[in-house]
Each structure stands twice: as structure tokens, then as C-alpha cells.
Amino acid sequence: MKTYDAIIVGAGQAGPALAHVLGDMGQKVAVAEENLVGGSCVNYGCTPSKTLIGSARAIYAASRGDEFGFSTGKLTVNFDRVMQRQRDIVTAMRERGEQKLYEMKGVTFYHARASFKSKTEMQVGDEVISAKRIYLNVGARAVIPDIPGLYSVPYLTNQTILELRELPRHFIMLGGGYISMEYAHAFRRFGSEVTVIESGEQVLGREDADVAKCAQEILEKEGVKFLLNHKAIQTEKRGNEIVVHVETKGNRRSEVVGSHLLVAVGRTPNSDTLNVENAGIKLDEKNHIKVDNHLKTSVDGIYALGEVNGRGAFTHTTYNDFEIMADNLKGGKRKVSDRILTYGVFIDPSIAHVGMTENEVRESKIKALIGTMQMSKVNRATEFGQEEGFMKVLVDAKTERFLGATLIGLNSDEVIHSITDLMYAKKPYTVMQNAVHIRPTVSELLPTLLADLKPLK
């Protein structure tokens, strides 16, 4: 049996970075990855989806030529080239990551599944290896709901959508979350008819109602159709078509007929691939691996990073788990609870959020101030022809510190970081209010917005 100082299971965002740190510390490290180096982000998530969104944005901009004073002639979309572009970018990024992994000092890479035989031993392919410290970075995958008939139709997930070779004529999407919203917008711009089916009262269930409504309206403006409060109760194949039977809360039934179906109703952790019971690792009710504030599981010497621990569902939170782990290994005290929730939804224009939502602030009973501004009041948005959306900030009335912010509009995914940084610095909003920002930008209007805060009622 080969013995290592550490075993890392998973070569996503946290695994290789941690292997590099441990190797530089002089440790002998084994990294096991069953599938593709780079994990979900590089192969099935951030990189391919945002590459497709980039193509869709360029197509949309070109389609508005008359508005901006130029003509492109008749616009056609070469879907093969669109998909090949994302495949080329993903492949190059994955190969770079894999090459770095092979070159890391002190690291042995196993391209095989790893599972526990005991709390210090793992079956990796045909071998059994051991280590006193084991780090789990195995991620999550799409939830496949128990809908009668689903397995009889060729449904797609966030992974298999990237294998499409033809542009869907009518793309039906189950779920109104981040994945569906982003792909709905992109494929509508490619030329597909798109229908989003959501069982809840709004899309983007985590967001405040005004944010969700605005996002829906942005997509509706370009022709995306939404069926809210509609539950998928059955699917079937009818000739070359896919039929989704839906039911409303009033038990009224109807059907949606399309050429392709995307299932995007949630994610489930890959903890079930590890035989965690052999190590005594405890899971929560959703099968996430339980961890403490320093990412340690219920078993000494075993740690879980990334989506599998349920403490963050984003690439940036996974990488932050690595940063916490690396800091702790060197005697630091960084912890998960230091992290402030922040994320983006990459429709166009994007949504960006940090901290608490307005709903959460109201529920907390914190005495707060609120400020809002329509993007139509922002000169940069007018100049660039993208006035949809608004900015909303929430401030603790007593400490004058930001509680949270949600921006939906031009460059929101970049602008949000100026608020995020002040929140980490624990500085009052007046620092930003009194700052001088570049004109004309979106950030230029943040001091103006902060000068007009009102009590949250």
C-alpha cells in the first residue's frame, strides 16, 4: 500500500490549488479525479456557460445595429461555430490545468474514482492508498426529479447541454433558477423559442420579488416565455417532440410541446460516490458532508471543501474554502463564517448580490436604511443602450455599515465588488458616499444613491 502525507479527492477549483500548497510545504500528495480536471466550473459550469453567454451577447449587440448607427445585413447564427468556440476554450483551460497538476512538486495524480475503505485508507482505481489527512473536493451534480416519463425522453442537464449539435427549435426548461435563466437568455438570442416552467411563484427563488420580476421582464422583452406556478407532472415523447404536462395550483392541466428539454431544478452533492460510512463521516439531511468553521468533518484528519459541504454553491466559495484551508495549514485562523455571501446571475444585464436581501433584513428586524435607483437614471446605461434594472442597497441605521445590496443592470457584476470590499473592511457607507468616482460609469451613481437613503418601512 502506498502511503502519502495527504490525499485530495477531486481536481476542481480547490483540489489542485491545495495540492500545490501542500507540495510546496514538502508533503507527498496524491490527487484523485474520476472525471475531468477543472471540475464543474471549467467543464460544465462557469467557463462553457459564460462563453456561450458571450457569443449570445455579441449576437444581440449586432442585431441592434440600426439603433447604434450601423448595419450588418441579414444576421445568421452558426450554431456549430458557437458550440465549437466554447469547446475550444474549455479544452484549452482544462489541458492547462491538467498539465500544471502533472508538474506539481510532490504530487501524484490518479485519474480514477476514490472511495473510503477506512478513515485513513482509500480505494483509488485498482490501488489502495493511505494518508493521515484526506481532503474531499468532489462537488455536486444536477438533481433529476421524480417525474413520470422523464427517463423516456432525451432530457438535458447543465452537462449534456454542452453536447448539443443542433440549435433547439423550442427549448423547454424545467426550473427558474440561475442555470435556466442564463441558458434561456442565451438560447433565445441564438434563435430558439424558449419556455421556462417554474413551480414557484417567481423565478430566482432566493431573490427579492422586485429583483425576480425585473429579471423575468428582461427575458420576456426578448421573447422568453414563463409559466410560473406550473408543476411538471409528466413527460412523454410524441413523434419528434417532447411533451411536458403541467399542473397549476388550481389543478388546471395543460401541456408544453417542444424539441428539447433542460432539467435544471437543483443540485445534489457527490458524497454518495465516496462510501463515507466506511470512514464514519456524518452527512446532513441533504447529503452534504458536515463541516465545522474550519472545514473539518466529523472525523479527525478529514476535511471537505466546495459544493459537497453545503457551505457555498459557487466557484468562488469553493476557492475560498481552499484559501481558508491553506491559511489554517500555515497557522492562520481564517474560517467559513468570515465569508460574506456574494454571487452573480449572468443574464444580460447581469444580477449581482452581496450580503442580506431586503426580505432577510425585514425578517431580522434590524433597523435599516434603504436606497434604490433605476438604471435609467445612470448616464452610462443610457449611453450604452441598456437601461433595464435598478440598484438597491441596505444599510444598518445604527452602525452605518452595509447589510447587503442587489444590483441588476449594466456592469452590475463588476460594480458590486466596491460594496463587497467595504463590507469586508467593516467601514460605514459614508466612505463610499464621500468618494469621488469616475464619470461616466455605473459606479459613479453609488455616492448619489447613498446620499438619499430612507428608513426601511
Image (cartoon, rainbow, N blue to C red):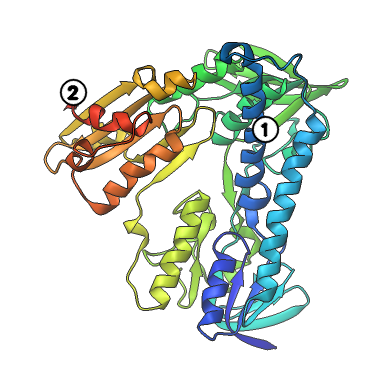
Identity of the residue drawn at 62% across and 68% down = 9
Q: Is residue 423 left or right of residue 416?
A: left
Task: Report crowding for label 2: few under 14, some 14 to 19, many 20 or more residues within 10 A (C-alpha).
Answer: few
Identity of the residue drawn at 63% across and 26% down = 184
Q: Can residue 90 be seen? A: yes
Identity of the residue drawn at 36% across and 22% down = 378
| Residue 423, image x, y percentages | 27, 47
In this figure, which residue is indicated by the disc labeled 1? 55
Whole-number angstrom distance, CA of label 2 to CA of label 1: 43 Å
Q: Earlier in the sequence, mark 2 or mark 1?
A: 1
Q: In this picture, is 14 found above or below 118?
A: above
Q: Quadrant of residue 438?
A: top left
| Residue 323, image x, y percentages | 44, 65
Q: Nearer the viewer, residue 151 or 84?
A: 84
The circle drawn on residue 457 is 2
Q: Can residue 213 be seen? A: no
Q: Nearer the viewer, residue 353 or 375?
A: 375
Q: Nearer the viewer, residue 353 or 228?
A: 353
Q: Are marks 2 and 1 in contact (CB under 8 Å)?
A: no
Q: Is residue 381 left or right of residue 372?
A: right
